[in-house]
Image (spheres, rainbow, N blue to C red):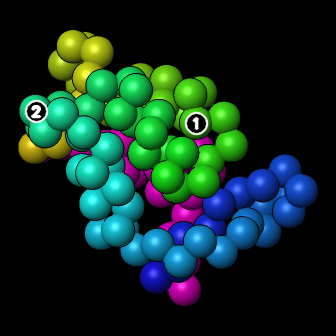
Amino acid sequence: MTLFVRSSSTRGGGIKVNKTEQQIRKIFEEADRDGDGILKKEDIQYAFQQLGAHFPSWRAHRGLHHADSNNDGAVGLAGEEVDNLIKYALHKYGYKVGN
């Protein structure tokens, strides 16, 4: 699979980034720089920077909004919250996995 990043200049065409879903998961896991198993907004922003996102702070805010199911202001790396964050990155706001 190939990850495409949308860009306003490509109008939906995307820029090839060549990331699999597992690689995206690893980027989010590595963004947990203090190793506590919890992604705070700053960690999520760092991950989106690593993914090459435009406006990573905004993407982190929106990703947190979509993934934080228990409303604690963070995303746990174990369970459905991180899965929801990856789904957000892949399907909702700027990233797509394709062939």
Query: What residue did someone put label 1 on?
Result: 56
Q: Could you give the CA–CA distance between mark 1 and mark 2, rounded to whole angstroms? A: 22 Å
The amino acid pointed to by label 2 is Asp
Residue at the far bottom in the pictured view: 99
Q: Nearer the viewer, residue 43 or 12?
A: 43
Q: Residues within 10 Å of mark 2 (few under 14, many from 20)?
A: few
Q: Nearer the viewer, residue 18 or 32?
A: 32
Query: What residue did someone put label 2 on?
Result: 36
Q: Nearer the viewer, residue 2 or 39?
A: 39
* Residue 30: image location, x then y, percent: 27, 51
Q: What kind of element bears circle 2?
A: loop
- Say the numbered circle drawn on residue 39: none
Mark with earlier residue (1, 2): 2
The amino acid pointed to by label 1 is Pro
Residue at the far front in the pictured view: 34
Q: Are marks 1 and 2 in contact (CB under 8 Å)?
A: no
Asked if the magenta segment contains residue 91, the reply would be yes
Q: Main secondary structure of the magenta part?
A: helix
Residue located 61% across and 47% down the image = 53
Asked if the magenta segment contains residue 7, the reply would be no
Can you tell which quarter of the image residue 68 is in? top left
Left or right: 9, with 45 as reference point: right
* Residue 65: image location, x then y, percent: 41, 23
- Looking at the rendering, in which quadrant would you find the C terminus? bottom right
Residue located 32% across and 49% down the image = 28
Q: Magenta part of the protein: which range?
A: 79-99
Residue at the far right in the pictured view: 9
* Residue 77: image location, x then y, percent: 16, 42
Q: Is residue 76 visible?
A: no
Q: What kind of element bears circle 1?
A: helix
Left or right: 91, with 15 as reference point: left
Residue located 59% across and 71% down the image = 17
